[in-house]
Amino acid sequence: MRRLFPVTDQTVTTGSGGRPPGAPDEGGGAGGGAAADREWSLDELADAYAYPGPGPGGPVPWLRANMVSTLDGAAQHDGRSQPISTATDMRIFGTLRGLADVVVVGAETVRLEGYRPARARAEFAERREAAGQGPAPAVAVVSASLDLDFSLPLFTSPLVPTLILTGAAAAPDKVASAEKAGARVVIAGDGMGVEPDRAVRALAELGHTRLLTEGGPRLLGQFVAAGVLDELCLTVSPMLTVGDAQRIAGGPSVAVPHRFALVSLLEEEGFLFSRYQRPDAG
Ligand SMILES: NC(=O)c1ccc[n+]([C@@H]2O[C@H](COP(=O)([O-])OP(=O)(O)OC[C@H]3O[C@@H](n4cnc5c(N)ncnc54)[C@H](OP(=O)(O)O)[C@@H]3O)[C@@H](O)[C@H]2O)c1
């Protein structure tokens, strides 16, 4: 992997601006480019994706999303994101989890992708302890229906109790089932649904300020529309799928496009790993 932006000594600087992977080396052996294009350690990735530090008044919530999209904008293939991902994308996915206090995810993604509890990984243990975090992030499932299988390990045997974000009008019997399974139900809306800004506030009140959402598109669209998304870590997968797959963010369009600023761009084998932030965030 190499860094394309901001430009540093890790950026390939060979004559024409880099070659496609596998192309013959015209530059006479291992030049700067070959040296720059190498596998990054998890520590290096964690440094590259560090959350902003606390503000003058203490920690403030920072909501980051991590999503993958094909060149033609598909956020899934055959109902899953795995076919459009790659090993390095999954390393970054794991790193972002390793840095987060909580992973916020829509119920449909939990159902379709068979979500399991987040693991405690030795590679991030020291960093998490220094940051005052437990060994693994909590998973917070956003659901109105609470139509979830509470017998799954995500609810019965996580390292940190799984949170369920829902509205005050959620069915009491489903709330009871969730709690009986060991989940913690957090009300973040007056009706059936969760209000995105309230979800962020409710998580912050529980001490979770390094927030990571892994989608899906319907949930991410609401965070975007509510103006509470601070950062998008977007993997652009060098694939075309055609079809009618969802984009990374769905729902009613915003009145005026929200402009984000590029803060970092990494590349490996044609996959682009970008990081965009809200210009007024932080
Ligand atoms: N490309 C990527 O990076 C990526 C990432 C994640 C997922 N995906 C793909 O996206 C697809 C699933 O995404 P999706 O957009 O259909 O669904 P989603 O956003 O994962 O989940 C939608 C569900 O979340 C709950 N929800 C959303 N907003 C809510 C609110 N304001 N209040 C209460 N509950 C709310 C509802 O659950 P209830 O129905 O339980 O009420 C809703 O049905 C899958 O195919 C998955 O593979 C792709």
Image (tube, rainbow, N blue to C red):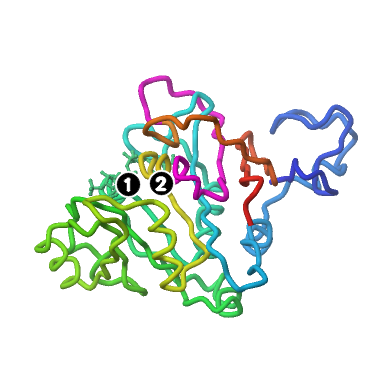
Relative to 222, residue 75 above or below:
above
Left or right of 193, for residue 92? right
Specify the segment rendered in magenta.
223-246
Look at label 1 and name its amino acid.
Answer: Thr
Left or right of 99, for residue 175? left
Mark 1, other Cα within 10 Å: few <14 / some 14–19 / many ≥20: many
Farthest residue to the left: give it.
173
The answer to the question of whether label 1 and label 2 lie on touching residues, with beta carbons closer than 8 A, is: yes
Inter-mark Cα distance, 1 to 2:
7 Å
Q: Residue at x 13, y 68 (%)?
A: 176
**Residue 170 falls in which quadrant of the image?**
bottom left
Q: Does mark 2 have its CB less than 8 Å from ligand 1? A: yes
Q: Which residue is mark 2?
A: 215
Question: In terms of secondary structure, where does tag 1 sit?
Answer: helix
Q: Position of residue 153 (x, y in %)?
A: 25, 65
Left or right of 55, for residue 105? left
Q: Residue at x 65, y 49 (%)?
A: 280
Q: Is residue 225 magenta?
A: yes
Q: Which residue is mark 1?
A: 109
Q: Closer to the camera, 254 or 118? A: 254
Quadrant of ligand 1: it is: top left
Q: Is residue 195 magenta?
A: no
Q: Closer to the camera, 234 or 219? A: 219
Left or right of 4, for residue 103? left
Look at label 2 and name its amino acid.
Answer: Gly
Relative to 244, residue 276 above or below:
below
